[in-house]
Amino acid sequence: MMPSTLSSPSTAVTALYPAFLSGHRRVPQWSRSHNKQKERVKVGVAVTAKVDLKPPPYPLDALEPHMSKQTLEYHWGKHHRAYVDNLNKQIDGTELDGSTLEDIIRISYNKGDLLPTFNNAAQIWNHEFFWESIQPSGGGRPSGELLRWIERDFGSFEAFVQEFKAAAATQFGSGWAWLAYKTGKLDAGNAVNPRPTEEDKKLLVLKSPNAVNPLVWDHHYPILTIDVWEHAYYLDFQNRRPDYISLFLEKLVSWESVSKRLELAIASAAEKEREEKEAAEKEKEEKERLERLETEEASENN
């Protein structure tokens, strides 16, 4: 099984995971013309937009000797911080000010025609997800339901490891590799996208360039990621990306977090499927009601 590349996703998710679980709410829209006007940094005016810089869920030296404190100081303290600072400047005073990070990602992805806020917003989300994908004394093999899913969908844990390593190592330039829970077929232009079957519900490995993440694809719920931008590993590994990837899986990955995310993904997907089924039934009932009215009116006119 070759890793898929998230290079030109079709439509943004409607049941967003995991922070998108609040359902189909109305979100602000941001046009390009408005964006260009509001994007300018206000000289001498305080920025009041407040997307927070969340720290990793452990001290910056907790991953040593596998990932150095210096790497965390630069990666989180400078790169992640810069994405937060830049996004707050971009959204300050716009309709996106006060929106959730996930909503900003969904709106500014703009079906692949990226608005300027996308890269900063997506990189903030990606890094928060990455910090929670690793832990001190991590790595090794998963267990329980997660292991059963991996063995079912990849054949073995070892086969998954090789596929994940290949995706991370072959992502050209900057980007990310992911393990995601997929629940349905992608929308494809004017083709009919059938409801997902049990065969569609599976784990798969993906890779994405730059800031793109699986949130911009329908039916994909990320449960694990590795950052393969050079700033994630260069201080510790220089240009030896494969060594960094191997150590990530052997010593750092938090299978506990991945297991919890899989559980959330399955529950979220089931809820979305239920809501879509109810919406389709209501639409069908309304259509039938209108057809009956038309028939009755036609009979009265005759």
Image (spheres, rainbow, N blue to C red):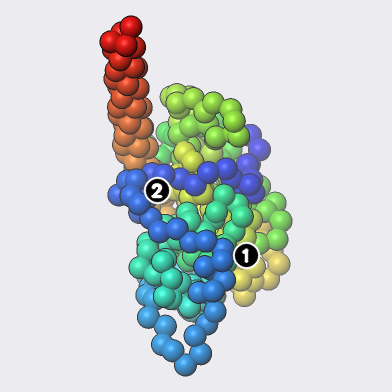
**Front-lying residue, 67 or 213:** 213
Vertical arrangement, residue 97 with respect to residue 146, above or below: below
Answer with mark 2 or mark 1, whichever residue precedes in sequence. 2
Residue at the spot 60% in from the left edge and 52% down from the top edge:
112
Vertical arrangement, residue 30 with respect to residue 294, above or below: below
**Front-lying residue, 34 or 108:** 34
Q: Position of residue 215 (x, y in %)?
A: 48, 50
Q: Nearer the viewer, mark 2 or mark 1?
A: 2
- Which quadrant is home to the N terminus? top right
Badge 1 density bin: few <14, some 14–19, many ≥20, Cα 10 Å: some
The residue where tag 1 is placed is: 229
Q: Position of residue 29 (x, y in %)?
A: 45, 58
Q: Is residue 48 visible?
A: yes
Q: Type of residue at label 2?
A: Leu
Q: Position of residue 287 (x, y in %)?
A: 35, 22
Residue at the spot 33% in from the left edge and 31% down from the top edge:
279
Q: Is residue 157 visible?
A: no
Which numbered disc covers residue 148?
A: none
* Quarter assignment of residue 205: top right
**Front-lying residue, 279 or 135:** 279
Which type of secondary structure does the marked residue at label 2 adopt?
loop
Q: Type of residue at label 1?
A: Trp
Q: Position of residue 46 (x, y in %)?
A: 41, 87
Seen from this angle, which residue lies furthest front? 301
Which type of secondary structure does the marked residue at label 1 adopt?
loop
Q: CA distance from mark 2 to mark 1?
A: 25 Å
The residue where tag 2 is placed is: 16
Residue at the spot 38% in from the left edge and 44% down from the top edge:
15
Q: Is residue 242 left or right of residue 94?
A: right
* Quarter assignment of residue 280: top left
Badge 2 density bin: few <14, some 14–19, many ≥20, Cα 10 Å: many
